[in-house]
């Protein structure tokens, strides 16, 4: 049985990638594993409040569970996973450790300059993962960063 690992941060681009992953699992009969990774707090933010749900305590778990619920509504068996750390590194490690056949992630389409300045999980993941990575653009994206 093949396994698809879907990495999510709960963003609109991740939602587009989830729909793609669900369709791919339906078409191939693959199992779906959903991974949401809480990133480390940026330097200098100290005790500042979380800006995104993925940064909140328990946010990664809620995001992963929502994606799993959506997959189950579509008739798939899916498993929710969470991690903490640099998202690309955690996703790549889970793909290796969990014997994933493919990783699916979204891209925010920041463009080459913003992607370099802000970092890009999809760009980094493409270079780190030991399995193929599919980067899905949402309708609002204009450029492939990876």
Image: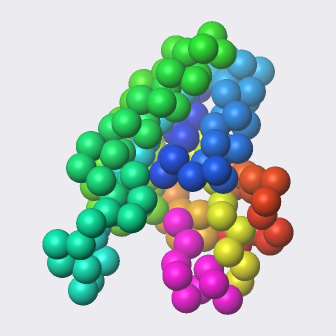
Q: Position of residue 69 (x, y in %)?
A: 50, 21
Q: Position of residue 91 (x, y in %)?
A: 43, 52
Query: Is 114 part of what is drawn in magenta?
Result: yes
Of residues 38 and 81, the one drawn nearer to the viewer in this rendering? 38
The residue positioned 75% from the left and 56% from the top of the image is 137
The residue positioned 34% from the left and 46% from the top of the image is 59
Above or below, 116 against 20 in this view is: below
Query: Is 116 part of what is drawn in magenta?
Result: yes
Above or below, 43 against 40 in this view is: below
The residue positioned 60% from the left and 70% from the top of the image is 123
Range shown magenta: 113-121
* Residue 118 in the figure: left or right of residue 137: left
Q: Position of residue 44 (x, y in %)?
A: 24, 86
The picture quadrant where one finds residue 97 is top left
Q: Position of residue 50 (x, y in %)?
A: 32, 63
The residue positioned 79% from the left and 60% from the top of the image is 140
Above or below, 110 against 6 in this view is: below
Q: Residue furthest front?
A: 49
Q: Pick the quarter of the image with the N terminus.
A: top right
Q: Pick the quarter of the image with the C terminus.
A: bottom right
Determine if residue 40 is in view. Answer: yes
Total marks drawn?
A: 0
């Amino acid at each position: 049985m093949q396994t698809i690992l879907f990495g999510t941060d709960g963003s609109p681009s991740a939602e587009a990638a989830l729909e793609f992953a669900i369709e791919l699992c339906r078409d191939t009969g693959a199992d779906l594993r959903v991974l949401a990774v809480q990133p480390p707090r940026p330097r200098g933010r100290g005790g500042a409040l979380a800006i995104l749900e993925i940064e909140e305590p328990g946010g990664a778990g809620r995001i992963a569970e929502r994606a799993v619920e959506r997959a189950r509504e579509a008739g798939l068996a899916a498993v929710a996973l969470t991690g903490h750390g640099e998202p690309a590194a955690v996703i790549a490690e889970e793909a290796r450790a969990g014997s994933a056949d493919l990783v699916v992630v979204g891209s925010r389409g920041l463009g080459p300059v913003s992607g370099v300045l802000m970092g890009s999980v999809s760009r980094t993941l493409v270079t780190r993962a030991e399995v193929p990575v599919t980067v899905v653009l949402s309708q609002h994206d204009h450029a492939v960063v990876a």
